Amino acid sequence: MSLSPATYKNHPAYGRCSCGNGYCKQVRMAAEEHQQLSAFVKSIHQMLRSEAQKIGADKAWKEHCMKTDILQKYAVSMQKLASTFWEQNSADEKKSAQCRIKWIVEKCVLYFFKGEMEMRRIKEKKKIKKTGNAVEKCGETCALCVRVISSKEVQGDGECLTLLDVGSCYNPFRVYPFLNVIPIDIAPAKPDVYVCDFLNMAVVETEEPVILNGRSVVELPAATCDVVVFSLLLEYFPSPKQRYLCVCKAYNLLKPEGLLFIITPDSKHSSANAPLMKSWRITLAQLGFSLGYYEKLPHIHCMAYRKDIHPEVAKHWAYYELRKQNGVETSSKLYIPQDFQEMQDKSDNIPHPEGERTIQDNASLVQMFSQLPYNSE
Ligand SMILES: C[S@@+](CC[C@H](N)C(=O)[O-])C[C@H]1O[C@@H](n2cnc3c(N)ncnc32)[C@H](O)[C@@H]1O
């Protein structure tokens, strides 16, 4: 694979070249390996999406989960990408993709330990008063929550937050002592990650504390997590319906006032996919999530959704947003740009390389987004 000099110049290894020659063999090899790993990871997502188009998303998913060799290669590639190349990039905040983990941790600290949860609770109380519903339950619901203890985690001294990391791959949150991490993945890259297909994992009602033993997880109790993380997870799924099922499941797993973090890749400027991000926000609000934090970093959207104590608050907001947009019914799908790309490819019958879009592609995407149930602000 041959890369242009401009690609090397943008590569993290370029600045660290010990011989001072940015085009030396070491830099070239690092850049090429980075490129190859990214291409492999993307090709798996692409393969799954085209299988889903041929045989349906459910069947494609089932078959995909049995391809252990491919899953294992994906896990190794992803871990290397994240912990070698993105870790290097994290020295440069502008390029950093690794900073998604830091972003999540920082927001958890602000929200759970620096008073922002209480502030949000007060705001919610005010809003619910406006909508005329009862508020007595505020602040009491957490007492009902069950505790899940991951036997693989070393417990910290103080109060730990239970964080379910879905699609954890290499368990990047393991280093934070205030987190009781439950890392799950269909194909773990590390032995401390539990084998689990989140799509098929059951959410059960129980009042007993749950201790996780063994290598896999098949069910988790409802309302047990302070935090659920989907970091670069949703775009793995070939269908908008599967992504929606994941956020529903996260909703049931979270305690009231818990946070769902969604990190999704997007190298475009902040407004390019704004209509799509808005559509997510409305779909999540219809479940009872309100947007807590949002930031567009250079290659990713970072979002934290709060499971409101009173789902009516977020549902009300969604209702009025939809009314502004001429009232479209509840959506049970979460779209990503690739869904539209492939719709366009199908109608053109012209193959497009994944990733780069032409001006024409962008024009058709804008048109398609404008036909989405929820248009931009
Ligand atoms: C792009 S990687 C992201 C890894 C990590 N979260 C990060 O931010 O670096 C997506 C991960 O999700 C996992 N995954 C995909 N579908 C899953 C499912 N249904 N249940 C559990 N893990 C899943 C994949 O195996 C893969 O490790």
Image (cartoon, rainbow, N blue to C red):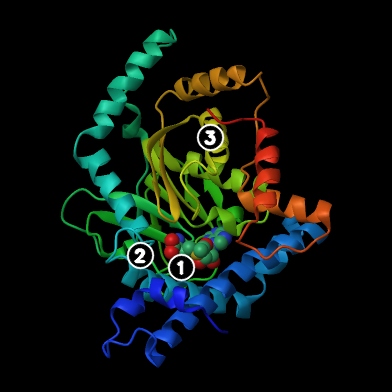
Residue 68, by quadrant, is bottom right
Residue 169: give its label: 1
In the figure, 158 relative to 326: above or below?
below
| Residue 155 visible to the viewer | yes
Camera-side mark, 2 or 3: 3
Q: Is residue 283 above or below residue 169?
A: above
Residue 370, label in figure: none
Q: Secondary structure at mark 3?
A: helix
Q: Is residue 139 visible?
A: no
- Tell me if label 1 and label 3 are in contact, CB under 8 Å: no
Q: Which of the two discs, 1 and 3, sits closer to the camera?
A: 3
N-term-proximal mark, 1 vs 3? 1
Q: Count numbered badges in the picture.
A: 3
Q: Is residue 4 above or below residue 372?
A: below
Whether label 1 lies within 8 Å of ligand 1 gets the answer yes
* Residue occupied by mark 3: 278
Q: Amino acid at mark 3?
A: Lys
Residues at marks 2 and 3, CA–CA distance in whole angstroms: 28 Å
Q: Ligand 1 near label 2 (Cβ, under 8 Å)?
A: yes
- In x, y percent, where is residue 215? 46, 70
Q: Amino acid at mark 2?
A: Pro
Identity of the amino acid at label 1?
Cys
